[in-house]
Image (tube, rainbow, N blue to C red):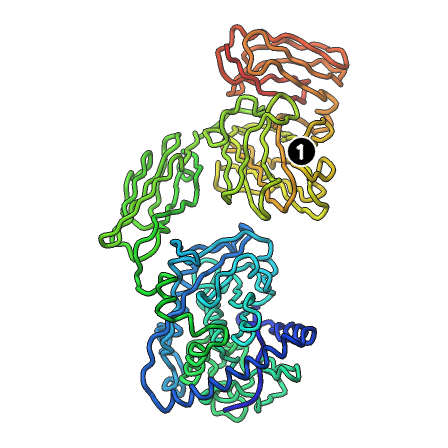
Amino acid sequence: MKKNLLLFAFSLFATIVSAQEYLHCGADEMRIATLKANPKIAQAVIKRDSLLEIFTKKYVDDFYQNRSTPPTYIIPVVVHVIHNYGSENISDAQIKDGIDILNKTFRKQLADTASIVSVFKPLHADCGIEFRLAQLDPNGNCTSGITRTASTLTYTGDHAVKALIHWPPEKYLNIYIVQNAAGLAGHCVWPADADSIPAWDGIVLTSSYMGSIGTSTYTQSVALAHECGHYLNLQHIWGGNNVPNFYYYPCADTAKDCNIDDLVADTPPTIGWLTCNLSGHSCGNTMDNVQNTMDYSYCNRMFTYGQKARMLACLNDTIAHRNNLWQTANLIATGVYTTPGPLCSADFTSNKTVVCQTAGSNQVLFTNTSYNGTFTSVQWLFPGGTPASSTAASPTIIYASPGVYPVTLKVVNGTDSASITKTNLISVLPNSGAAYPFTEGYESTASLNGPDWFANSFDTINDWQLTSAAACSGAKSVMLDNFSNSMNTRDELISPIINLSGAGTLSFRFKYAFARKDSANADQLQVYITKDCNNTWIQRLNLVGAALETSPLQSTPFTPTLASQWQQGTVSIPATYLTSGFRFKFVFTSNGGNNIYLDDINIDLTSGITDLNELISELNLYPNPAADPLTLHFTNNSVKPLTISILNVLGETVADYGKTIYPQGENSMLLDTKNLSNGVYIVRIADEKNGISKRMIVNK
């Protein structure tokens, strides 16, 4: 069947709402608005589509006359995961599963093809088209064919994501995985439009429609094959729209305009289906091809021979350079000429890098992510772990002793081998940490890479670091060089274990300083807590944009030089989190702002921060680290008797200076430390119910 209609440049697959209901596809309206606003683009698209249609008609006629078996067409693919560190950042395994289902759909290899309605089984075609993840990037470097880019554009998922990263479309099919593909399951730019706007060429897919594992299901996995059909110039099975007149035909249109067709001879006229009604019929048919990949039925199983011929025509035309994708030179350039390809790189991931030795909290899952090829053997070494070695692809290892341990992986692919060792990868913390009160001013902290504090970066740009350039009190703090950070980088700063078991109401306070470059910056600081070392984190504080700002806009790198540029943050701790495995972490997400600093962290017994401010407004120790004696300086706001004491890291009192009514205002006193061993201690000032603490170092 034939018609002179032009379909949309990017046909969008409707999002599933439930087993029986789907959202209407709104991309047609979007494209019509674009074409009305850009008549030159509209004319270019119409011209290119006309040329492609002339070539397609001739190719299809020859296809049916020849009946020869064409060669297998291989299309190099790169999958760009656009994420904001959420569930949309799907695993390599889920992506590969999606590519596998895609290939089985195109090659007539799905396990459930036997369920195809008998009348359409003779029309079910092996399209002879395969999609392979690229093994060489545009610069000829080794790649897994999967890239990952952090961006909040994952939430909108329109054409803008393609500006983040876009490999040459004449060499690769670019597939983008996002959290939300413009409110749809996916969308694709068609050849005529891609030839007019090459920067838009590619497919955008919501992460929950990729593959059958992880965030997706087998039912939803049909979306990718549907979009690849559009990529290769297939219309929806119910037909399309006439672009010159700017109208379209939605799926299951109750007007039942059966004169509209999909330009494929062996697909019966239909109005389209939003449900898997295998006995459904419309337009006078005995039965509609409801299981066709280009319908909306979500029981898609097949392409017909007519659809195959139309896709092969697209792959042999110069429009949008689809004819270059499968050429031998391009397959060699993208590394997919042979399968499996040569071993390229050894690599692996772990679901945790910090665990506690407590049973149930000390297990780490490792996954081999080496590429490329099929590995004949995998050899792991786990010093400090049980078992100490493994040949499994994804072993689970138990770490029972505190310490910091490396992990080594060696992979073998025939005669090729590669190995990688990640030093200081796994940190195992003791069952229980220091007792409250907990205080940290970073004066004596030697490293943020363990064994106490851990800086965890989700990128390779910048990270939390110790600094003496600024401090709320003392001489040091921690800072993140956010001035030179890229957008949407994410960095964590994770505390040591603190034993809060048996505590009553606690106050968690810290000081921070931050400036923005521009009023539009929406940088974010979050505080999370866990009660079981590293297993379950909950958010307790979220400061964004102006709410995080402590200083006016700064066009140069920000360094706080005034006390007024520091503000206090407070975090509530639920009673159920008062455990021996308590930890907290700061999570900073960049949005183009300036530097951020943290200092003076305190977790102490208190009835509220107001009471603490009424008690003591300033507490300093110097010199710190100190020999003997140590000067304690504080500003007293209370008329109550105060107790000054020194505690060890276990919370035990090692020096008690008694209960005294101190004058209001500034006070100074010497603390005798000659009987204390070298190490970390806590100086505490408290009344009968409130207290404030500061860490000190004795170093004689």
Asked whether, in this view, residue 695 is left or right of residue 666, the answer is: left
Q: Where's residue 700, x and y in %?
A: 50, 9
Residue closer to the observer: 422 or 493: 422
Residue closer to the observer: 291 or 27: 27
Asked whether, in this view, residue 145 is left or right of residue 655, the answer is: left
Residue farthest toward the left in the current orientation of the protein: 415
Counting other residues with Cα less than 10 Å from the Cα at mark 1, is it few (<14), some (14-19), or many (20 or more)? many
In percent of the image, x 63 and y 11: which residue is there?
Answer: 631
Which residue corresponds to mark 1?
A: 513
Q: In this view, does 280 lie above or below 456?
A: below
Q: In this view, does 60 lie above or below 323?
A: below
Q: How many marks?
A: 1
Q: Where's residue 246, x and y in %?
A: 66, 81
Quadrant of the rendered image containing residue 192: bottom right
Q: Is residue 279 above or below residue 465?
A: below
In percent of the image, x 38 and y 82: which residue is there?
Answer: 124
Asked whether, in this view, residue 6 is left or right of residue 135, the answer is: right
Quadrant of the rendered image containing residue 403: top left
Task: Give, as a three-letter code, the residue at label 1.
Answer: Ala
Quadrant of the rendered image containing residue 619: top right
Residue closer to the observer: 297 or 308: 308
Circle 1 SS class: strand
In percent of the image, x 43 and y 29: which residue is there?
Answer: 430
Q: Where's residue 604, x and y in %?
A: 62, 26
Residue farthest toward the bottom in the current orientation of the protein: 284
Asked whether, in this view, residue 571 is left or right of residue 447, the answer is: right
Q: Where's residue 681, x and y in %?
A: 54, 17
